[in-house]
Image (cartoon, rainbow, N blue to C red):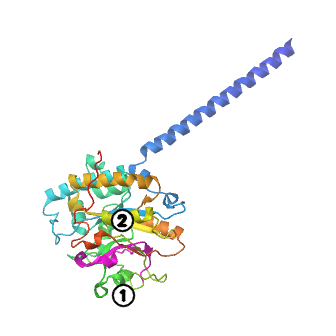
Amino acid sequence: MKKFFGIFAVLLLSLIVMWLVIVTLQKQSEVSIEANVSNLDETSQGEQGRQQTSDLIDSSQGPVIYLSFASHNEDEFHPDYPNFIQDEDAFWESRSNLIAYAQMLVSHGVQYDFQTDWNFLLAVQAYDQGDESTNGKNVIRYLHEDLGVDIDPHSHENGGYNFVDVAYLISELGVEPTGVVGGFIAGPPESSQLDYFWSLRTGLMYPSATWTPEILWGGGTGQHQNESDYWISGVWYPKSATEFDVHDPTAPLPNVGNNSGTWDAFFDLLEALQDGELDPEGFYTATIMINQSEMDEANRQLYESYLLEVASAVAQGDVIYSTITNTFIAWETTQDGEPTIHHTSSSADTLEEPPFKKPLKRPLPKVEL
């Protein structure tokens, strides 16, 4: 009998030990799950919105369009832009419109390049310590850290600030600028800045500042006049100022074509793709451009209506939203150095004003916002 109770006691003790082990493992699993959920909850919209490299790669059998969205603000020498340091009210209004526009884009899964000149950045330095609308961060940090926006330097190099100086101001506000040249003069050849960006490294206003251009984007002409020859979709390494649309793999910098930056040209390109008119081996790019001075509620609603129209093309894989940098990464990863240089053939060719200033020619679709 004693032997029986001894065996029973051993078995009971074993069962108790096993139960304790199981309970401990379950608790550890629950803690792990809770930690993962907590980490996801704490992940900013920006981290969720940023693309992984695998998200950039199209695995379909046909071509797609890598669609980026970009915006410019300008120095005080441009129409519609005051000296933001001197006009603080104008700065806060512009900041508010920018935040609303960026939030609208991100809500539709869009990848956005904010391309900024020095005028707005100096006002951010002077006035913007963050508030509830930006989670306590200055607007540049908020765009990048919370919304996943790429911050690209843009400069007309007026007032003594070149691209390197603008990149320096971005970094002083707490964000690492990309290596994207946010717009430049590609032609006519005698006015081309191609050679300039091949060698640009140091600042003018801040001589100790350094920045290295990595990707050209937005090449056009001065005042955007007679520039349809430079409205190109694709990625390539421009050979020279006189042969800008000729690929030279030994050239220092790649160019990501913006397809003119208009909705009209994008929809024409999309129609050509869906009609099977594009090279199935090609790599196609487009950008939708807007000026920061135009980010009012009416234009936000207009752009949102077009995003709703594009949604079906995104869902079926004809369009991939991508930043300019990630578009180049996708080309570099998938194309083995093969260029695509597709000249835009569009009703946009008839524009007599800068493409992002001209009202859209396409009728506004009737959609519920």
Q: Mark 1: which amino acid?
A: Thr
Q: Residue sitting at 34 percent across and 60 percent down?
A: 174
* The furthest residue to the top: 1
244 over 37 or under it: above or below: below
> Which quadrant of the figure contains the C terminus?
top left
Which residue sits at x=85%, y=13%?
2
Dots 1 and 2: beta carbons under 8 Å?
A: no
Q: Is residue 331 above or below residue 237?
A: above
Magenta segment: 209-238
Which residue has dot 2 on it? 268
Depth order, front residue of 240/363: 363
User: Which of the 4 image quarters holds residue 292?
Assistant: bottom left
- Measured as percent of width and height from the top left, residue 143 is found at 33, 56
The secondary element bearing badge 2 is classed as helix
Q: Is residue 221 magenta?
A: yes
Tell me how many marks there are.
2
Q: CA distance from mark 1 to mark 2?
A: 28 Å
Residue under the point 22% across and 68% down: 74
Q: Is residue 366 visible?
A: yes
Residue type at the position of mark 2: Asp
Nearest the viewer among 256 and 76 is 256
Disc 1: CA contacts within 10 A as few (<14), some (14-19) or many (>=20): some
The local secondary structure at tag 1 comes to loop
Residue 122 appears left or right of 102:
left
Relative height, residue 13 to residue 212 (above, below): above
Residue nearer the viewer, 245 or 256 = 245
Q: In the drawing, does residue 70 fall left or right of residue 80?
A: right
Q: Quadrant of residue 262?
A: bottom left
Q: Which residue is mark 1?
A: 242
Q: How far from the left and from the top, in percent, is residue 148?
A: 38, 56
Residue 48 on the magenta span:
no
Q: Is residue 128 visible?
A: no
